[in-house]
Image: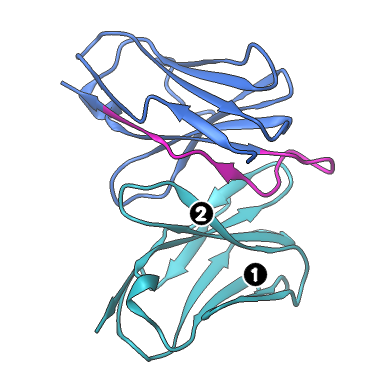
Amino acid sequence: DAMVIQNPRYQVTQFGKPVTLSCSQTLNHNVMYWYQQKSSQAPKLLFHYYDKDFNNEADTPDNFQSRRPNTSFCFLDIRSPGLGDAAMYLCATSRDTRGLTGEQYFGPGTRLTVT
Amino acid sequence: ELKVEQNPLFLSMQEGKNYTIYCNYSTTSDRLYWYRQDPGKSLESLFVLLSNGAVKQEGRLMASLDTKARLSTLHITAAVHDLSATYFCAVDTGNQFYFGTGTSLTVIP
């Protein structure tokens, strides 16, 4: 089945220790997104790729970076995680021809804990 | 900045009852989505509404979109416990995608 896969599902890292979360998709969608979701809050868009074009949200901290080496994979790098970065990180994909957005398909998420 | 507000934020209802969740947004859009999220899980797509007057139904849930009023509703008919979850609307303006505040629904036996 076509899907969005995130690894790992649970990640524990130490304060200040770089961590990378990964997302892959078999949907062949051209847009990929990374969201941060904290407890009892709506998902917050960090950035997205429209094909290879990277789009950063204005309020995304510099501590967060992303890479998309090919259509199928996208990575979220947190260079120096702080306690406030503990959250669920959601990857999503969409295929849109009219504009930038469209129905988004979400992966299962990675729960990040910072100790 | 686009604002997407859901009402109510928290909803506790008895099994068998009906209720409506409202999603108001502050700018022009003709595309709106509803998602369901179970605790600790990811988002599951429920409905895609792509035009004014669109109505979609799936089981006990029905969603509608009024683009002139900038309002979408999610109606729950004869609620059952399995519907307990958080429901998000999300507005697509073509270059922005904003989630609503979420409505946490608890269905009580």
Badge 2: chain ID = B
Count of picture labels:
2
Q: Is residue A78 above or below residue A23?
A: above
SS at mark 2 in the image: strand
Q: Position of residue B20 (x, y in %)?
A: 47, 82
Q: Magenta stretch: dominant SS? A: loop
- Picture residue at 34% right of the left edge, 69% below the top: B84
The foreground one among A18 and A4 is: A4
Point out the stretch of residues depicted in magenta: A94-112
Q: Position of residue B82 (x, y in %)?
A: 36, 71
On-image quarter of the C terminus of chain B: bottom left
Q: Name the mark on residue A31.
A: none
Chain B shown in which color?
A: cyan
Q: Is residue B56 above or below residue A114?
A: below
Q: Is residue A36 magenta?
A: no
Kind of residue sitting beneath label 2: Glu
How far is disc 1 from disc 2 in space, using C-alphas? Answer: 23 Å
Q: Position of residue A37 (x, y in %)?
A: 38, 40
The foreground one among B85 and A66 is: B85
- Picture residue at 23% right of the left edge, 27% below the top: A113
Judge from the rendering whether residue A52 lies leftward or rightward of residue A64; answer left or right. Answer: right
Q: Name the mark on residue B44.
A: 2
Mark 1 or 2, nearer chain start? 2
Q: Position of residue A86 (x, y in %)?
A: 27, 30
Kind of residue sitting beneath label 1: Arg
Report which residue position mark 1 lands on. B70
Q: In the rendered image, what is the letter of the chain coloured blue?
A: A
Q: Residues within 10 Å of mark 1 (few under 14, many from 20)?
A: some
- Picture residue at 20% right of the left edge, 14% below the top: A15
